[in-house]
């Protein structure tokens, strides 16, 4: 995980003076008229995190310096790019003949070998900085919304201009639906992994109580949970594991009042339940916002497809699934944007013109909704919509 601390760009969109900003850890809005360089700025910052200069061929600038803070090791990394000293000549995507070139393995390999040739990486704080080819996890949603997102496996879902031109509306709808499915799968796998770890730690604490060796809840560490509540906690917890509590309410309460170890076990179960709830809170906020804003009694439903061992996301009306492709353009935009924010954890998400296809009421609520879904990620939004910025502090709005 990483986020951008600051940048300085020379010659952006023909400027004679450099553009430099120190960014907020969470909310950043770049505002300006058409042609002011908002899109170019996001492309440069995306390329710096991706360590890939293949998308910069037609971006108007001269030089860029980007400071990146890594989350795990808390290192400060500087990436520098000088257009004049690019090590390799740019590939001419526009003059490639025929769509057949897209599927040519050698062509793809040449693109990847050429990518990032101009970026220079150095550490500003210690000598253990990442290798020069390190790609930092982040998401970039251009106006086309063909997401260029770093996945946990290190695969980059990028498309060249030639590929994008070949996409018709129907194919784009399929790409949108597939991107939503993949992004949801990435998030749900991460969330399930965290929940399993919480449950395993809770189980270890419970076994320590039952067989000796201590517990996460110290002896005499406060009043026990009331007996009636304790019975509900244990019953609901076991039900979530598809296990039936075979002790009756009266017998449970009698034992609970007499046995301190049982009280400590319930304390541990309650702690596990609380931690799982915190882990799932972003998902609940995501679901609530979608259902608040979508019209026509639409509901966002998370299902577990046992046969494929996959968790699925779908929209329903009165229990009947609605194909993601049939959502309105505004509904698609909102779903994809919030899902990217949800899955970002503490990394950076860049969105060009997040207001696309959205009613002004949605635009006004958009930034607050994103923060509500994930207050830990860094958002870089490029817009010329006053509504998007309406409730954003002036300290986080940068005019270009």
Image (spheres, rainbow, N blue to C red):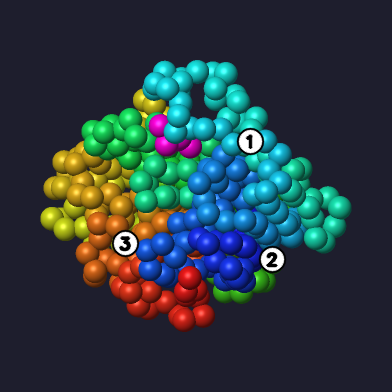
Residue at point 58%, 30% (across, down): 111
Residues under labels 2 and 3: Cα distance?
52 Å
Q: Position of residue 283 (x, y in %)?
A: 40, 55
Q: Residues within 10 Å of mark 1 (few under 14, many from 20)?
A: few
What is the number of the mark on residue 355? 3
Nearer the observer, 90 or 106: 90
Q: Position of residue 321 (x, y in %)?
A: 20, 40
Residues marked 2 and 1 touching at CB (< 8 Å): no
Magenta region: 158-162
Q: Position of residue 327 (x, y in %)?
A: 21, 46
Residue 353, above or below 18: above
Residue at point 48%, 32% (across, down): 93
Residue 248, magenta (yes or no): no
Tag 2 secondary structure: loop
Position of residue 284 in the picture relative to residue 327 (left or right): right
- Residue on which disc 2 sits: 218
């Amino acid at each position: 995980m990483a986020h951008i601390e600051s940048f300085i760009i020379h010659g952006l969109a023909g400027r004679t003076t450099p553009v430099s900003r120190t960014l907020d850890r969470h909310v950043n809005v770049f505002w300006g008229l058409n042609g002011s360089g908002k899109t170019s700025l996001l492309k440069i910052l995306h390329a710096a995190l991706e360590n890939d200069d293949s998308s910069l061929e037609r971006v108007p600038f001269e030089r860029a310096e980007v400071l990146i803070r890594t989350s795990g090791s808390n290192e400060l990394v500087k990436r520098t790019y000088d257009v004049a000293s690019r090590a390799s000549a740019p590939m001419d995507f526009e003059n490639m003949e025929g769509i057949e070139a897209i599927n040519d393995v050698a062509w793809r390999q040449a693109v990847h070998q050429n990518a990032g040739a101009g970026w220079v990486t150095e550490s500003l704080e210690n000598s253990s900085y990442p290798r020069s080819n390190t790609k930092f996890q982040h998401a970039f949603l251009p106006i086309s919304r063909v997401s260029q997102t770093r996945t946990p496996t290190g695969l980059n879902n990028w498309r060249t201009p030639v590929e994008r031109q070949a996409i018709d509306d129907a194919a784009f709808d399929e790409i949108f639906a597939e991107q939503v499915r993949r992004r949801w799968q990435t998030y749900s796998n991460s969330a399930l992994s965290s929940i399993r770890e919480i449950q395993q730690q809770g189980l270890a604490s419970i076994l320590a109580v039952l067989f000796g060796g201590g517990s996460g809840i110290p002896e005499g560490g406060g009043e026990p949970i009331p007996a009636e509540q304790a019975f509900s906690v244990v019953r609901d917890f076991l039900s979530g594991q598809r296990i039936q509590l075979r002790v009756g309410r009266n017998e449970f309460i009698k034992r609970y009042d007499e046995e301190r170890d049982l009280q400590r076990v319930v304390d541990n179960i309650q702690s596990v339940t609380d931690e799982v709830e915190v882990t799932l809170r972003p998902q609940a906020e995501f679901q609530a916002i979608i259902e608040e804003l979508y019209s026509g009694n639409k509901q966002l439903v998370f299902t577990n497809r046992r046969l494929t061992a996959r968790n699925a996301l779908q929209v329903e009306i009165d229990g009947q699934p609605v194909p993601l492709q049939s959502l309105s353009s505004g509904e698609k935009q909102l779903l994809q944007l919030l899902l990217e924010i949800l899955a970002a954890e503490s990394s950076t998400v860049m969105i060009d013109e997040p207001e696309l296809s959205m009613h002004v009421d949605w635009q006004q609520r958009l930034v607050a909704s994103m923060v509500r879904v994930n207050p830990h990620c860094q958002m870089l939004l490029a817009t010329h919509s006053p509504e998007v910025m309406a409730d954003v502090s002036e300290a986080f709005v940068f005019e270009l």
